[in-house]
Amino acid sequence: MSIDAPAKAIPQPRKITTKPRVSDQIFRAIVTAFSFSALVILSLIAIFLLMKGFNTLKQQGIGFITNFEWSVVVDDGGVETAHFGLQAMLIGTVVISFIALFIAVPLSVLTALFLTFYAPERVKRILVTVVDLMAAFPSILYGLWGFFVLMPMAEYWAKLIHKWLGWIYIFDLPDPIYTRSPFIAGIVLSVMIIPIITSVSREVFAQTPLDRVQAAYALGATKWGMIRAVVLPFGAGGVVGGSMLGLGRAFGETVAVFSVLNIVFRTNFQILFTQGGNVASMIIQKWGEAGPSEVSALMAAGLVLFILTLFVNFLANSVVTRTVKSGR
Amino acid sequence: MNTPVKENDGNGNLMSDQTNNARPSSLSDVSANRERNKVGGTAPLGTGLEARGVHAWFDKHHALSDVSLDFSAGTVTALIGPSGCGKSTFIRTLNRMHEFIPKTSMAGQVLLDGKDIYEPGIDVTKIRLQIGMVFQKPNPFPSMTIGENVLSGIKLAQLKVDNHDELLEECLTRAGLWNEVKDRLGAHAGGLSGGQQQRLCIARALAVKPKVLLMDEPCSALDPGSTLRIEETISQLSKSMTIVIVTHNMQQAARVSDYTAFFLSDGGPGQMIEVGPTTEIFSRPRDERTENYVTGRFG
Ligand SMILES: Nc1ncnc2c1ncn2[C@@H]1O[C@H](COP(=O)(O)OP(=O)(O)O)[C@@H](O)[C@H]1O
Ligand SMILES: [Mg+2]
């Protein structure tokens, strides 16, 4: 080894490749195809809705979202004048979904805490099965239950709320008609989204790191103190995620809402009053007697709902990732 | 001379146990030692803890058999022994953490201040306030800041404190962490190194003013530098409280403890084989199995 040997040139990094076996390649192609098929189907639906609804969107422009009139008038000369505005339905969708969340989130979190930390093993097994069953129930059954069982009770609650809180605008109402209101639709929806929020919350609560749980207990914490200091901060991201998933379901729910809500094209924030909106149920309501131009409008409404749901899910994901990062 | 059991020479180095001739030479001297401290008017040394005939089970598995140990006020006791001999199980019976694992049971008594902590109707949370614990893996609350972590026990137990800042500084100083974190008390605890996190956990345990501190292999996940800092911390703390420490590291036991108890399981439930002043356990143990272990012939 000589001291004045020329300095070695730094080589270019080599390109590293492997040649997979044929069987591996085939399998890879299959799984890739299947995983992309979901994406393809989703895009096809969006494209279909866009094509069908394109006329309406072109005609109505931004007014399709900001107006709240929905009418097709054909005059004597056979000329059609159409107004399609979704505003009331969009706001109605958000209003009943938030009523649903307002009721469902606390109930679900408490249920999840009970199941994870308090319930004896047997009670827990039974309850988990029941809650999962709730998720599998067809929504028309919730609609029927909402109409025949819940509505009479909820009418009474609504009167109570109006009596005590009527001085707040949203709990006031122009006429004393309490049935088929956003309030009742919200309650039905809340029952429908409790299972998803509960099961997501339960799963994250159960993953709370044991060492942190023990740290809290070793500091003289009570069970509730431990839950507040350790479980809730850890599980917050999951609860938010579960709630967003529930919100997604609430946005798109059709039949159950249709059965218990009086759909009116008027923006209404007075939740106890018999007047509300929901994009999905509106579509089902108008479907039967729609002419060609209205069908196009309903397709466009579907597209708006599609985008809204996609957006909520996207938001859910980003919120969850953020809270999860800071919480753990 | 009112020499405390163990002393710090002021530079943070422990004086060698062997050169400290005030050490009790046998177990019976412990009370004499405590007397000496009383006569000398030194600070109160915390409260003693006593285990009497403690057994522990995991479901049907008998993990620990008939352990009786007396932890005198103001002493540091090291629990040593090979893996799986029941050291963790034993230390967890001392502050009733054992019962958190489902289907576990125990027998015997654990006396704090002469009162059985397993007595029916006793408030477990109060017991755990008096008997703090530091775990093997540092486990600060990551959603809280450094400051909030230290004070978390106060909040959890809803204790009243006059001056939070003062307590914060005192605990972090005693845990040997104050200088490193005083400028970032509002930062999240997850950003600290492993050794700093462990000292934060010690500070957190100190904030509720426990009389006894249990430590289950507090240094096993740490680098040598952090280990040294924590050993210094332990020797500082031992002036005012009773400490029980499980350690795998024989040198550590020799450096920090006044007494050492050797645990062993011969296939059956773990047992306490021998206890005595640390110097004796390491220089002339009575039991052959202890000698084999401390000289590194097994384990
Ligand atoms: N959570 C548990 N469930 C069942 N058995 C356990 C559990 N923890 C410890 N054991 C058993 O108890 C015995 C003592 O374990 P441990 O106290 O952890 O030993 P050490 O801390 O001395 O290594 C071992 O036989 C171990 O298998
Ligand atoms: Mg252990």
Image (cartoon, coloured by chain):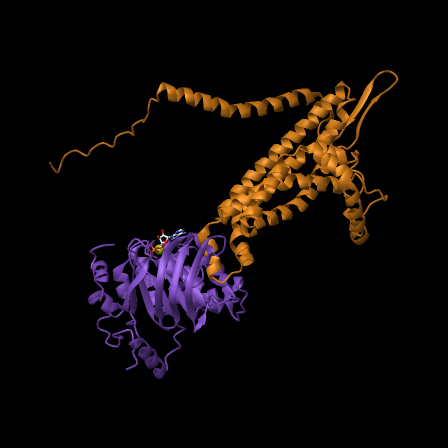
Chain colours: A orange, B purple
Residue B175 position by quadrant: bottom left
Most distant residue in the left direction? A2
Residue at figure coordinates x 31%, y 27% from the top left: A16
In the displayed structure image, the side of residue B272 where residue B178 appears, left or right:
right
Q: Nearer the viewer, residue B116 or A18?
A: B116
User: What x and y, as percent, mark residue A275?
Assistant: 80, 38
User: What x and y, as percent, mark residue B119?
Assistant: 48, 67
* B32 is higher (above) or lower (below) than B196: below
* A261 is higher (above) or lower (below) than A79: below
Q: Nearer the viewer, residue A180 or A144?
A: A144
Residue B17 position by quadrant: bottom left
Q: Does residue A185 appear in this view?
A: yes
In the displayed structure image, the side of residue B72 where residue B165 appears, left or right:
right
Most distant residue in the bottom direction? B39
Residue B97 position by quadrant: bottom left
User: What x and y, as percent, mark residue B9?
Assistant: 28, 72
Residue at figure coordinates x 54%, y 40% from the top left: A318
* A37 is higher (above) or lower (below) than A263: above
Question: Which quadrant is home to the N terminus of chain A?
Answer: top left
Q: Nearer the viewer, residue A322 or A259?
A: A259
In the displayed structure image, the side of residue A203 where residue B25 appears, left or right:
left
Total numbered labels placed on residues in the image: 0
User: What x and y, as percent, mark residue B42?
Assistant: 36, 79
* A290 is higher (above) or lower (below) than A226: above
